[in-house]
Image (cartoon, helix red, strand yellow):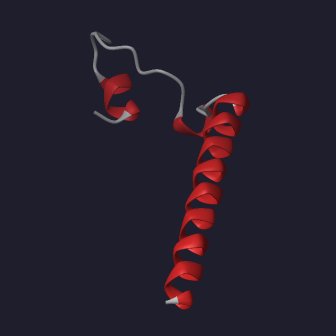
Amino acid sequence: LQREQILALPEHALEAGPPEALFSPAGTELRGETERELHRLREDKARLESQLKLAQEQ
């Protein structure tokens, strides 16, 4: 259900929560996830570069 639909219910049996525009994950949560992804990408790059170097030497 959309937030507006929940708010339109006469009994308000459900909690509508904050509007979507106000929802945002914590900055530290996003930063940690971004840093982990960046680390994985750097590891992948190093691995692929070494594989490429080996392939070029053959």
Q: Residue at 28%, 21% (x, y): give it.
A: 9
Question: Residue 45 appears in which quarter of the rendering?
Answer: bottom right
Q: Position of residue 54 (x, y in %)?
A: 54, 79
**Above or below 5: residue 7:** above
Q: Position of residue 26 (x, y in %)?
A: 67, 28
Q: Is residue 17 left or right of residue 9?
A: right
Question: Residue 25 appears in which quarter of the rendering?
Answer: top right
User: In the depicted view, which residue is nearer to us: 24 or 5?
Assistant: 24
Q: Which quadrant does the N terminus fall into?
A: top left
Q: Residue at 28%, 9% (x, y): give it.
A: 13
**Above or below 46: residue 29:** above
Q: Residue at 60%, 74% (x, y): give it.
A: 49
Q: Position of residue 33 (x, y in %)?
A: 61, 39
Q: Is residue 8 left or right of residue 23?
A: left
Q: Residue at 38%, 24% (x, y): give it.
A: 7
User: In the depicted view, which residue is nearer to us: 15 or 41?
Assistant: 41
